[in-house]
Image: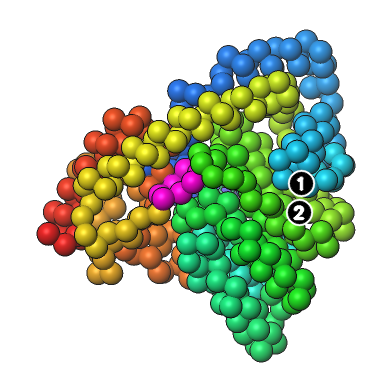
């Protein structure tokens, strides 16, 4: 036996092992427009503690047991009621799986459906976490061009036909139809109907990621793809991260049972954290509705502050989205701008964080002249200051027309 501590795992990694991930916390800016944090001041901390206290008094002894892998039943019942009320999705609590955020259900679905080389269609720029999961399973990810209403139906159809012409089957379409991350648009009804119609005609299921749907600051709700379909071709995921806190790590999925059972089998780690589920269940049952109204008032003001600051500090040649909800503004600089190369310097010198467009590119390389700005974390005053600094840095770096 050797006590040699220079042992290497290099030869042992599985062929399909994930690429290495950086350890440690990345540096955050004081003006942190990079990550999707909600407003820290409005987190319902006292209410969560009270909910937890109540649940522990009533059911605390159940922490001694391993709950079923689908997760704490009363919270699944709450989710089923919420889906029926808010999204016209009518399923029983047994058709719900709770997950560690919605990231885990997304992972389970991808793991269940994707073989290396399978084609997945998604928006040309979309949530990087899901892209990373798809890459992890070696999917052939193809971005479908979008306008400010979502994927262009003709382009979507062309992409399906192209895959078929190559002898490949599209495994599913992934979309964030409401307050899309990062582009900010919401698919109107007709666009949703067109997507569902294509899914039905070509027999391609859809993974609908509705993680921002409750964060609406103006305008009216648009029906879910799930409700529009009604044929079992839509799998649905959503989350408590954006309406309570990402730190709770609670999300959920529903789908036809055939898929649900396979996804459940792929779920690692047993049930969700029952301690967190206790708190969220008691809080959500009484107060989530009014809490959402409170946070939406706050976030609306922050969005407006960021839009006004962009107007004031970024000149001609720069355009941005005006989302009716969600947490992001998607900014496009002139074609030659390279927001990847200056990102670290802007963080260092201005203390401003943003994410360059390439992080969201289905092809992994497009979008160097785009950035996603999250307005959820900083105060309106900080947003004003941070955007001024960002614009000054972009100007100094020659990214803007003078
Ligand atoms: C579109 C979208 N889906 C899913 C997630 C995953 O969030 P969570 O796992 O916290 O629910 C995010 C997080 O930012 C997101 O933007």
Which residue has dot 1 on it? 88
Q: Are marks 2 and 1 in contact (CB under 8 Å)?
A: yes
Q: Is residue 351 left or right of residue 33?
A: left
Q: Residues within 10 Å of mark 2 (few under 14, many from 20)?
A: some
Q: Earlier in the sequence, mark 2 or mark 1?
A: 1
Most common SS among magenta residues: loop
Q: Inspect the magenta stretch and tell me whether residue 143 lies in it.
A: no
Which residue has dot 2 on it? 227
Whether 47 is drawn above or below 165: the answer is: above
Residue nearer the viewer, 153 or 376: 153
Q: Is residue 67 left or right of residue 133?
A: right
Residue 271: tell me if it is visible. Answer: no
Location of residue 332 by image quarter: bottom left
Q: Which residues are magenta?
A: 322-329
Q: Position of residue 9 (x, y in %)?
A: 56, 56
| Quarter that holds the C terminus | bottom left
Q: Secondary structure at mark 2?
A: helix
Q: Inspect the magenta stretch and tell me whether residue 327 lies in it.
A: yes
Q: Position of residue 323 (x, y in %)?
A: 46, 49
Q: Is residue 369 left or right of residue 314?
A: right
Location of residue 348 by image quarter: top left
Residue 376: tell me if it is visible. Answer: yes
Q: Position of residue 329 (x, y in %)?
A: 40, 49
Q: Give the residue drawn at x 49%, y 46%.
A: 324
Q: Secondary structure at mark 1?
A: loop
Q: Position of residue 373 (x, y in %)?
A: 38, 47
């Amino acid at each position: 036996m050797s006590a040699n501590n220079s042992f290497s795992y290099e030869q042992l990694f599985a062929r399909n092992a994930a690429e290495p991930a950086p350890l440690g916390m990345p540096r955050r800016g004081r003006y942190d427009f990079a990550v999707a944090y909600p407003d820290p001041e409005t987190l319902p901390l006292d209410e969560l503690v009270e909910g937890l206290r109540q649940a522990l008094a009533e059911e605390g002894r159940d922490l001694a047991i391993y709950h079923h892998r689908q997760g704490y039943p009363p919270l699944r019942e709450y989710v089923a009621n919420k889906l029926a009320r808010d999204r016209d999705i009518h399923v029983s609590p047994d058709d719900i799986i709770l997950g560690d955020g919605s990231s885990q259900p997304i992972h389970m679905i991808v793991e269940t459906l994707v073989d290396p080389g399978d084609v997945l269609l998604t928006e040309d720029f979309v949530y990087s976490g899901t892209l990373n999961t798809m890459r992890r399973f070696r999917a052939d990810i193809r971005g479908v061009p979008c306008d400010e209403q979502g994927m262009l139906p003709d382009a979507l159809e062309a992409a399906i036909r192209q895959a078929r012409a190559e002898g490949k089957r599209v495994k599913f379409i992934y979309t964030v139809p409401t307050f899309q991350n990062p582009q900010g648009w919401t698919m109107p009804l007709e666009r949703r109907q067109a997507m569902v119609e294509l899914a039905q005609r070509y027999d391609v299921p859809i993974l609908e990621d509705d993680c921002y749907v409750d964060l609406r600051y103006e305008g009216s709700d648009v029906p879910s793809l799930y409700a529009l379909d009604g044929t079992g071709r839509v799998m649905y995921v959503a989350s408590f991260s954006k309406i309570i806190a990402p730190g709770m790590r609670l999300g959920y999925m529903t789908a036809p049972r055939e898929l649900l059972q396979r996804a459940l089998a792929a779920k690692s780690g047993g049930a969700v954290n029952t301690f967190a589920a206790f708190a969220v269940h008691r809080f959500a049952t009484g107060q989530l509705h009014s809490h959402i109204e409170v946070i939406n008032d706050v976030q609306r003001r922050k969005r407006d502050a960021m839009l006004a600051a962009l107007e004031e500090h970024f000149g001609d040649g720069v355009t941005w989205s005006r989302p009716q909800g969600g947490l992001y503004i998607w900014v496009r600089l002139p074609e030659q701008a390279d927001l990847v190369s200056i990102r670290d310097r802007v963080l260092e010198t201005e203390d401003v964080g943003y994410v360059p467009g390439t992080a969201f590119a289905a092809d992994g390389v497009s979008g160097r002249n785009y950035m996603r700005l999250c307005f959820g974390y900083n105060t309106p005053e900080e947003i004003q200051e941070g955007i001024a600094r960002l614009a000054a840095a972009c100007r100094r770096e020659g990214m803007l027309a003078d």
